[in-house]
Amino acid sequence: MLRARGRGARQQEPERVHRARLPLRRSLLGRLLAVSALVAACSVAATAWIAVQTTSGAIKQEQGQNLTADARIYDTLLEYAARNTTWDGVGATVRKLARESGRRVALTTQDRQPLADSATGETARALPPQASAVVDPLSVNTVLAARGADGQGTGADRIDPRAVGPFRLSAADSRALRRTADGKVACLNRAGIASDVVVGASGRPRVQIVGNDPERALGTRCDLAALDAPTRSERKALDALTELADACLKRQGREGVTLNNDLSWGDPAPVAVPGEPGALVPRPVPAPRDAPAEQAAPSVEMPELTGERDRAIASCVGTARSEQLSSYVASPALLFIGDEGGATLPGFDLSPANTARIAGAAALVLALTVGASVFAGARLVRPLHALTGAAQRMRDGEQPASVPVSGDDEVGRLAAAFNDMSAHRARLEEQRKAMVSDVAHELRTPLSNIRGWLEAAQDGLADPDPAFVSSLLEEAVLLQHIIDDLQDLAAADAGALRLHPEPVEVRELLGQVAAAHQARAENAGVTLAVTAPAPGPALSADQVRLRQAVGNLVSNAVRHTPEGGRVTLRAYVAERDASGPYAPGPNASEEGRGTAVAGGGTVVVEVTDTGSGIPADDLPHVFDRFWRAEKSRSRRTGGSGLGLAIVRKLVEAHGGTVEATSTEGKGSTFALRLPGAGGRPAPDGMTTAF
């Protein structure tokens, strides 16, 4: 049977080891690592996304602002070039633009000879190899021009509309046409049509109808055609432009062309006037963008030029205009725009290299997080593993061992509590073993005596006379007494000790106890006395149990008092100070320490003897079970060792405390402190019957 059990224990050992090693996915370390990695990954992803979005938005916004500022700079310099034949005097304009934009602005010729630069002296760094734009009014950058001049672009015409050259009116012609335009506006206002005078880049005024239907003026008597009549200078410039265009066409083997005032050619096509069915009026062809934009009527339309001749004419007219205007505008110049330090605005390029750097940084952060989590998790799990191993060893019946306490944190406090529990369990185990040994010893003595007398009678060595029967009865009574004491202790430990409280007069109870032990005291030559006031203090208690407790104390006192000694029973009411109830003395039972009593004061019952006393080292153990001052456990010097333990349990069941004081060689005093009448009831767990 023992070998089979040993094999079973060996078979269970691998299972315990297997259970002790949890898989990583189920362990605390694995879960902590997974949560930390998830949090780190989410944090890195969220931070990277927010950083990319914020940085991209900020860079795009800054790039947009700089592009708008660059377009304004370009448009301003383009206007300067369109209105001036040289770049002389452009320095003031460049410095003003630099102050307004906070950027560095520089102009050079096409061979990079400086014309103007907002950065001078030591602050002027070398210009970048690539220019920001080319300022040429005869070949406009359509991207920058579309952002300049309040968003008005140049369309397909690459000539700036502000480059008018010989088409610019003289001051006298401009004033005369302005008076005519003011008269037309007054006429239209009288007809209920709101209009304004707008002056173009050439100085020619035109009438602009307010509203989305400018053809309303055709039905009035206000003839606007007078404003379209060319002046002498305009006819001269138009003739020169026609000659240049004809020369271009002749080089291509084509016939010449006659240009209209708006630089169109051919006869105007009759079109229907909206709002007037059947009426046809000629609608002139719109001028190209090299003519002043303000002179082109918004309602003028022309069929799309699709023929090969028309395309050739349009190309030659554009070439002729550039040739005609080249002497009236400034030469092309290189424009450089950068920051004040001389560098250009860096862009945000999420290139493969940048992507790799971001991914590397994220991986580094994630690796550091995982490493820190592993380190912290290992430090957290290590003491838990030690606790688990120690608990399993205790379960397997091994000797309890303490675990190291790493600190004063939660895990450290758990380890300290486990060590306390382990030490307490070890003490309980020792007490249990000692109790089993003591119980066996206490029961063996009367049983051995009974067996010896019965075997002697069976063998005819002893006669069953009255003395024989009396001896057997005495041993049986002693055996019954030990069993009753063990039963009382078991009931008290289980919280099932039944009490029957009733009013008790302490002086009378002490007299009954003294009378019960008077004969034994006289036989031992000990004087037994009772000292209590009349009437004595009253309390509510189970009279039988209380008499049992006091009787145990008196029995011990008589047993340990030599002949001629004295045992005194005394009762009184203890005075309470302002701080509260009476506090138990230093030698009170451990379970009774700190027990508060409330209500009608504290009744103190003392049993004092003049015996041999108790050594100071033994005094803390007098209420332990089976403890006896005489280690040989002789029947002559002591009882079962359960009497004082029962006294402690009975007193605590009444809500009181018990303590012992002793002076070796002079005697001992045992004091029971019980709540007086009206005090608190028995503690929870004790059964009280009424």
Image (tube, helix red, strand yellow):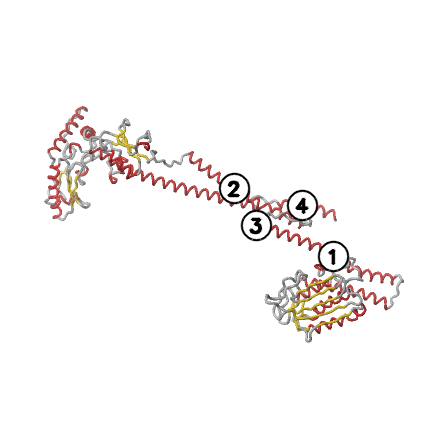
Q: Which residue is mark 1?
A: 436
**Residue 395 against residue 65 in the figure, above or below:** below
- The percent position of residue 307, horizontal first and vertical second, equals 20, 30
Q: Is residue 129 visible to us here?
A: yes
Q: CA distance from mark 2 to mark 3?
A: 23 Å
The three-letter amino acid code for the residue at tag 3 is Asp
Residue receiving disc 3: 409
N-terminal of the pair, mark 1 or mark 4, is 4
Q: Secondary structure at mark 3?
A: loop
Do the residues under discs 4 and 3 have CB atoms within 8 angstroms? no
Front-most of residues 377 and 416: 416
- Please report the residue visible at 49 percent of the width from the left and 38 percent of the height from the top: 364
N-terminal label among 1 and 2: 2
Label 4 is placed on what type of residue? Glu
Give the distance between the C-alpha atoms of the residues marked 1 and 3, in whole angstroms. 40 Å
Residue 336 position by quadrant? top left
331 and 36: which is toward the camera: 331
Figure quadrant of residue 112: top left
Between label 2 and label 3, give the one nearer the viewer. Answer: 3
Residue underneath mark 2 = 370
- Circle 4 residue: 13
